[in-house]
Image (cartoon, coloured by chain):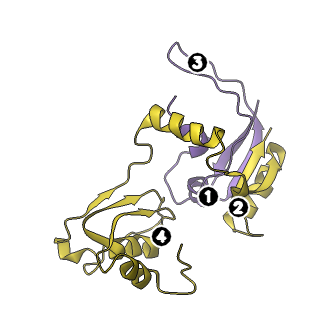
Amino acid sequence: MKAAVFVEPGKIELQERPIPTIGPTDALLRVTTTTICGTDVHILKGEYPVAPRAQRSRACSAPRL
Amino acid sequence: MIDHTAEDPVAAIMRLTGGRGVDVAIEALGTQDTFELCLKVLRPGGVLSSLGVYAGKLTMPLEAFHAGLGDISIVSTLCAGGKERMRRLMSVVGSGGVDLRPLVTHRFKLDQIEEAYDLFSHQRDGVLKVAITP
């Protein structure tokens, strides 16, 4: 699958990643539409101590299903 | 609705509430200015609901904080209500109770993600929200 990856502050790039394997209490979602959250912009600017390659969009992480 | 470019929002809200202030002020931008404005329009005992994500330093002005005597609550809960809240929200959207489509001002493919970030982070071209599709 394609993934937009936070490489380092100021740099995001599209990479090919394996589809994640999940456990019995997880859900694997196919994203049909998402957005860029203001938080993502803060992360891109390096304003939060987010580890490179670990970015999650709030648009995906917020809903608790 | 108050246009903050046309009038002082604090004065307008105080006028509209008869000098009382509002029960709940929602901060959605994550800036010092909007955080302070929310404090200033709260009634004593009111709730500041902070949804915004801040960067750098957020300071608490004594005046707006009523020096600690304002009896206010500051909460940063983002998804209170969890699954049930989401179900109700989707129900409102699905039934046409609210049309959120005008919020999506730009569309990009995932391949254009860098372009999308550039537009959104610089708030160009009247962007509100971008939709990213595979």
Q: Residue furthest left?
A: B69
Image coordinates for residue B67, horizontal then vertical, percent: 19, 76
> Which residue is under mark 2?
B120
| Protein chain holding label 3 | A
In the rendered structure, which amino acid carries the disc numbered 1? Val
Residue A16 quadrant: top right
Helix, strand or loop status at disc 3: loop
Residue B40 at x, y = what percent? 34, 76
Q: Contact, CB < 8 Å: mark 2 with mark 4?
A: no
Q: Which residue is mark 4?
A: B31
Residue B30: x percent and y percent?
48, 64
B79 vs A2: above or below:
below
Q: Colour of chain B?
A: yellow
Residue A22's label in the rendered image is: 3
What distance separates the C-alpha of mark 3 from that of mark 4? 38 Å
**Callout 1 touching callout 2 (CB < 8 Å):** yes
> Residue at the location (74% across, 69% down)?
B126
Q: Do badges 2 and 3 share one subunit?
A: no
Q: Are callouts 3 and 1 both on one chain?
A: yes
Tell us which disc is closer to us: 2 or 3.
2
Give whichever of discs 2 and 4 has the lower sequence position. Answer: 4
Q: Which chain is purple?
A: A
- Vertically, is A65 above or below B101? above
Residue B51's place in the image compared with B82, above or below, is below
